[in-house]
Image (cartoon, helix red, strand yellow):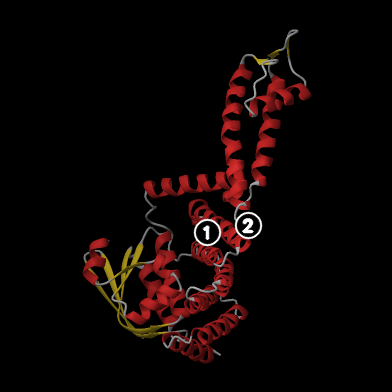
């Protein structure tokens, strides 16, 4: 079996050199299939990436659909091999190929997966380094600068994931906004506000009304926060000012493509 | 396939020879494992006499790349012929690895 794989892959490389891209892609795919059956996912990912490369070369300026599909498949194998950095790179290439072919659904999904794989890669290297399969225990820790850079990237990506799914899930912004409104409404019920009649501790419906008015920065002025509620109102107003354009950008970014 | 090692300052130069394929990549993995056990942190892989590498060989290089990264080490590649360069480009590995035209420029980069 090893000899079979060896000779088929060699033949695929020969065909690639002779610019017989379609035949080479077929052989690379065949080898990848054998690797998948043997649970050698990293090798399978590499073979599928080569098949994708063949399709991309064959496509020239025409259709990139096959290349995109193959890159996507390769990325999934890299994910199975838990090589998230390579998976992220392959998903990115799949996204680029889909975009060239005006397949925006494929682009959206691959772009999302690319970011998600990179976030997983950062998380693993930051928080699960001890689970690494390396033969020796890390004797020299990575530099503080490197760790800080990774941590900031991870925080930024995680925030982007929650807030709008890297720009590909605008519906998350609505959920995030609603949760923010509800959260602040609950906080307002703990403090006091001034209505036209008196200074009161607001009930939930009243607090929700005030929260929405503050979040949307309408500010009718019929309810005025007091004490600590002033600080919460300021924070919520900032949140509203920031989240509303994020939602509009996400929505237009995604749906204007179609 | 043969693996020759030499040390220049604190960089271990690993010169590979012949063809790297599914049949001999376990040998290469063994050689790399011994490098990691010796706690070498800077490794330069010289491809001057390598004329072919398959996906199994590439997977071994990726494994070494990740293992070294985890222990705070780094790996560079040099002297690849056009065929090997094409394989790295078609698999997009040239975007993950540090590849240099010759030993001098690779050594300078460590």
Q: Is residue B105 left or right of residue A125?
A: left
Instruction: Label 2: state its secondary structure.
Output: loop
Instruction: Label 1: state its secondary structure.
Output: helix
Who is closer to the viewer here, A216 or A48?
A216
Residue for point 68% across, 17% down: A191
Residue A121 appears in the figure = yes
Q: CA distance from mark 1 to mark 2?
A: 43 Å
Q: Residue furthest top?
A: A197
Q: Is residue A128 left or right of residue A145?
A: right
In this rendering, the answer to whether A230 lies above or below A87 is above
Residue for point 75% across, 8% down: A197
Which part of the image, by quadrant, shows the N terminus of chain A? bottom right
Residue A168 appears in the figure = no
Q: Position of residue A231 (x, y in %)?
A: 58, 21
User: To which residue does mark 1 refer?
Assistant: A131
Q: Position of residue A8 (x, y in %)?
A: 51, 89
């Amino acid at each position: 079996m090893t000899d079979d794989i060896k000779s088929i892959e060699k033949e695929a490389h020969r065909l690639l050199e002779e610019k017989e891209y379609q035949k080479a892609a077929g052989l690379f795919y065949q080898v990848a299939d054998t690797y998948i059956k043997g649970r050698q996912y990293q090798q399978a990912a590499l073979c599928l990436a080569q098949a994708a490369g063949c399709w991309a070369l064959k496509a020239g300026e025409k259709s990139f659909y096959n290349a995109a599909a193959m890159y996507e498949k390769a990325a999934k194998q890299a994910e199975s091999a838990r090589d998230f950095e390579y998976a992220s790179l392959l998903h990115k290439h799949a996204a680029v190929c889909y975009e060239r072919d005006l397949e925006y659904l494929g682009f959206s999904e691959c772009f999302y997966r690319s970011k998600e794989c990179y976030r997983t890669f950062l998380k693993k290297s930051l928080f699960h380094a001890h689970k690494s399969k390396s033969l020796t225990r890390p004797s020299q820790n990575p530099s503080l600068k490197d760790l800080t850079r990774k941590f900031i990237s991870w925080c930024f990506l995680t925030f982007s994931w929650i807030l709008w799914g890297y720009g590909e899930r605008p519906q998350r912004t609505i959920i995030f906004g609603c949760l923010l409104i509800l959260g602040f409404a609950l906080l307002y019920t703990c403090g006091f506000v001034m209505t036209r009649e008196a200074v009161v501790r607001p009930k939930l419906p009243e607090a929700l009304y005030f929260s929405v008015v503050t979040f949307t920065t309408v500010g009718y002025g019929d309810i005025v926060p007091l004490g600590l509620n002033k600080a919460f109102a300021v924070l919520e107003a900032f949140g509203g000012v920031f989240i509303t354009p994020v939602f509009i950008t996400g929505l237009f970014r995604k749906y204007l493509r179609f | 396939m043969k693996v020759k090692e030499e040390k220049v300052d604190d960089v271990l130069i690993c010169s590979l020879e012949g063809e790297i394929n599914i049949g001999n990549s376990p040998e290469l993995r063994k050689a790399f494992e011994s490098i990691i056990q010796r706690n070498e942190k800077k490794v330069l892989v010289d491809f001057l006499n390598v004329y072919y590498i398959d996906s199994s060989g590439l997977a071994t290089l990726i494994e070494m790349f990740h293992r070294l990264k985890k222990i705070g080490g780094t790996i560079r590649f040099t002297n690849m012929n056009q065929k090997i360069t094409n394989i790295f480009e078609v698999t997009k590995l040239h975007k993950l690895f540090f590849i240099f035209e010759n030993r001098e420029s690779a050594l300078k980069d460590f």
